[in-house]
Amino acid sequence: MTLLMKLTLSLCAATAGIAFAGAASADDSKAPGSGPSPYSDCGIGAALFPDTNWAAVTSNVIWDLGTTAVTSATASPQTCSGKKQKTAMFIGHTYEQLAEETAAGKGEYLATALTLFGCASSQQAQVITQVRADMSRNLASPGYLTQTRLEKAADYYNAMDRAAKHACTA
């Protein structure tokens, strides 16, 4: 086994250990291991291969050593299934474009995200107004500039999810 392979496996094992420890401490009322599997139920791999566990795991490890999958499993396990997972992945990968289009009030990425949330075109203006208000508050908060890109994308996802729940009927 090459040094690179050993390092990769060690990093994967350490990341998985941190993820499972974080998941257990995030909600002590759940039994350990009862949440989603970060490698087969979350991340890019699960989005690409929802019915093939080995392919999801392989894809997650190859893509970014599973860090996206582990982060989504620990920070927001509710995104590790179906539509919500795909929407969270889309927002995570296009956050900068979404932020710009949200500020402008229109755009292709914004329309796609709203469609992923199940918002018909007639409902989108109301959601955009609410998301713009929420994101304005986020931008004005003192800690915004020190947030990571992932934290900003998670805030955006949460703002859009709240707005869509109130305005959209899917």
Image (spheres, rainbow, N blue to C red):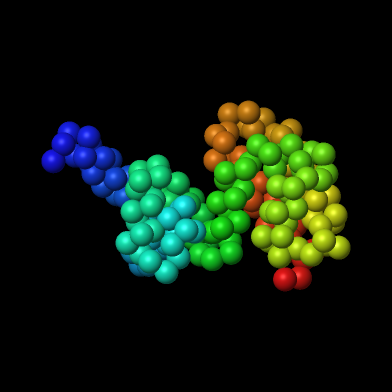
Residue 85 in sight in this render:
yes
Q: Residue furthest left?
A: 1
Give percent across and percent down for residue 22.
39, 50
The answer to which quarter of the image holds residue 123 is bottom right
Query: Between 29 and 120, which is closer to the camera in this rendering?
Result: 120
Query: Between 36 and 109, which is closer to the camera in this rendering?
Result: 109
Left or right: 59 as drawn, with respect to 127: left
Q: Residue at x 51, y 54 (%)?
A: 76
Left or right: 56 as drawn, with respect to 163: left
Vertical placement of residue 3 versus 167, above or below: above
Q: Residue at x 85, y 54 (%)?
A: 125
The answer to which quarter of the image holds residue 152 is top right
Q: Residue at x 63, y 41 (%)?
A: 95
Q: Residue at x 45, y 46 (%)?
A: 68
Give percent across and percent down for residue 3.
17, 34
The answer to which quarter of the image holds residue 99 is top right
Left or right: 147 as drawn, with respect to 125: left
Vertical placement of residue 103 versus 113, above or below: above
Query: Between 51 and 152, which is closer to the camera in this rendering?
Result: 51
Question: Which image quarter is the N terminus in?
Answer: top left
Give percent across and percent down for residue 116.
67, 60
Give percent across and percent down for residue 10.
23, 41
Vertical placement of residue 33 versus 136, above or below: below
